[in-house]
């Protein structure tokens, strides 16, 4: 049995908005299993929306670099917020993002071992060590990605909270739609969708949501249960699937409708094909 700590109770409260006492009870009942405690609170109708991220565990920032051929993101971590605001640290993160865009590494280990283009006498990892010695803190390159540009594609990144959250969106169908992609990227930063559309929700997640919804309405007449559960599942999709979410700049539109309207305006079918939302400290 896992010992329930104060930090665990605080994390559950941060993720569910439920009072400390109820969070403690839920964790005790679930023997310290955070996800089970959340599910039980939702089944009881005490918790509704649940944040994907719990407590932030790392400092750092996410840098984005937009080149002629691609957009690259990289997360660089440090020990304190003070260092992440250091000019040398900021410059290093920006240069690493550009390095990823220019060299197209296939793995993090391979990237760390390759020559650093601004000083070929050292590797990327050795340059990281040099920055560590200067700022006096451990620095880690946590993860990266690189999306290629191409014919009929529009990519845009959006940086929020000084690089603590960065989003990236790809629209297929036409070049020159970066403004639309940027608007959607801004929306993603604020609304944190988990999936692009309902078809991408894993079967296990769907089954769990149906189970939770059934538990919430178990006292209703049997003939109503199927309809009520379906309605709750649709509400879950509206909350977690990007294309079903209400656009933050105009709540009369879903993201799907926003894209459809732009398609009609330019006479070319457009589609959001993928997105990412990175937050410092979240995998």
Image (cartoon, grey):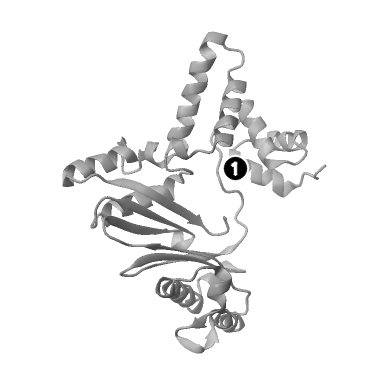
Image position, residue 211 (x, y; %) = 60, 26
Q: Which residue is painted at 55% across and 43% down in the image?
A: 51
Image position, residue 43 (x, y; %) = 63, 27
In the picture of the structure, the residue carrying the numbered disc 1 is 15
Please state, as top left, top right, bottom left or bottom right, where the N terminus lies in the image.
top right
Image position, residue 37 (x, y; %) = 69, 36
Please state, as top left, top right, bottom left or bottom right, where the C terminus lies in the image.
bottom right
* Foreground residue among 19 and 78: 78
Q: Is residue 261 left or right of residue 223?
A: left
Q: Looking at the image, which residue sits at the far bottom?
A: 121
Q: Is residue 255 above or below residue 280?
A: above
Disc 1 on helix, strand or loop?
Answer: helix
Q: Is residue 118 above or below residue 162?
A: below
Residue 66 location, quadrant: bottom left
Image position, residue 234 (x, y; %) = 45, 28
* Foreground residue among 266 and 254: 266
Residue 2 location, quadrant: top right
Q: Is residue 37 above or below residue 189?
A: above
Res. 221 visible in picture: no
Q: Is residue 168 left or right of residue 31?
A: left
Q: Which residue is painted at 17% across and 44% down in the image?
A: 265
Q: Is residue 194 left or right of residue 222?
A: left
Residue 269 location, quadrant: top left
* Foreground residue among 199 and 62: 199
Q: Residues within 10 Å of mark 1 (few under 14, many from 20)?
A: some
Res. 183 visible in picture: yes
Q: Is residue 236 above or below residue 55?
A: above
* Foreground residue among 220 and 84: 220
Q: Which residue is painted at 37% across and 59% down in the image?
A: 157
Q: Which residue is painted at 32% across and 54% down in the image?
A: 182
């Amino acid at each position: 049995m896992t010992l329930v700590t104060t930090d665990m109770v605080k994390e559950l409260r941060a993720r569910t908005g439920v009072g400390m006492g109820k969070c403690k009870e839920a964790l005790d009942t679930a023997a310290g299993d955070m996800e089970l405690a959340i599910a039980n609170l939702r089944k009881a109708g005490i918790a509704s929306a649940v944040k994907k991220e719990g407590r932030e565990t790392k400092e750092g920032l996410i840098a984005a670099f937009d080149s002629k051929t691609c957009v690259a993101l990289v997360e660089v971590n440090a020990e304190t917020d003070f260092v992440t605001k250091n000019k040398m640290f900021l410059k290093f993160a920006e240069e690493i993002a550009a390095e990823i865009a220019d060299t197209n590494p296939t793995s993090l280990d391979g990237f760390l071992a390759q020559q650093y283009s601004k000083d070929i006498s050292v590797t990327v990892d050795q340059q990281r060590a040099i920055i560590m010695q200067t700022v006096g803190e451990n620095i880690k390159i946590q993860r990266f990605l690189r999306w290629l540009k191409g014919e009929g594609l529009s990519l845009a990144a959006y940086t929020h909270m000084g690089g603590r959250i960065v989003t990236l969106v790809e629209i297929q169908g036409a070049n020159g739609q970066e403004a639309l992609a940027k608007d959607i990227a801004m929306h993603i930063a604020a609304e944190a969708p988990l999936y692009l559309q309902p078809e991408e929700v894993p079967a296990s997640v769907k089954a769990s949501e149906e189970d939770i919804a059934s538990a919430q309405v178990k006292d209703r007449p049997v003939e109503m249960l199927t309809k009520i559960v379906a309605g709750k599942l649709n509400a879950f999709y509206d909350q977690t699937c990007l294309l079903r979410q209400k656009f933050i700049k105009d709540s009369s539109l879903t993201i799907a409708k926003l894209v459809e309207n732009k398609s009609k305006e330019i006479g070319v079918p457009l589609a959001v094909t993928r997105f990412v939302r990175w937050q410092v400290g979240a995998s």
